[in-house]
Image (cartoon, rainbow, N blue to C red):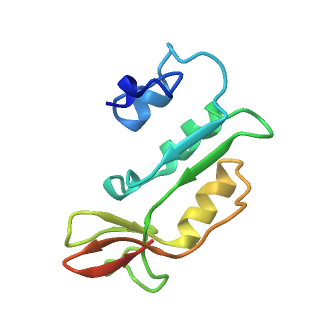
Amino acid sequence: KAEGRGCYDVVRVGDVESVLTDTHVVGCLDLVVACDVFVYIGDLRSVFQSVSKRLAPGHGLFAFSTELLGEGQHVAGEDRGFLLQSCARFAHKQSYIHNLAKESGFLVKAMREDVIRKNGGKDVVG
């Protein structure tokens, strides 16, 4: 449907890593948006690194949503910064996102908590 609208220069479909490493996409990207994507990926390190390599230096933007994992929440004995929840979606800690951003050379310009969806009639914060 997106291609049929004619409002995009290029539409790529595939998993995150294959799209970011697609050799048919030439040059740097000005914007990478991932809404309701990272809930299906636990460890985001390789995604952040791949985005960092593809964004235009100095002005490229990376915008995304995640479900929020409280700073005190983790599986007993391990704290990786993300957790697979009973609803089969991953949640990520803000500190984990900040650390990945810093490691990958990003400057966090904005981060806010808000209701991103409903699950069983209850608000899900991200």
Q: Residue furthest bottom?
A: 72
Q: How many marks?
A: 0
Indicate whether 43 appears above or below 20.
Answer: below
Indicate whether 94 appears above or below 39.
Answer: below
x, y percent for residue 123: 33, 80
x, y percent for residue 104: 65, 48
x, y percent for residue 79: 42, 73
Residue at image coords 51%, 49%: 45
**13 or 75, nearer to the observer:** 13
Residue at image coords 70%, 39%: 60
Q: In the image, is 84 to the left or to the right of 60?
A: left
Identify the image quadrant of residue 5: top left
Identify the image quadrant of residue 27: top right
Residue at image coords 49%, 30%: 20
Q: In the image, is 110 to the left or to the right of 21?
A: right
Q: Which quadrant: the C terminus?
A: bottom left
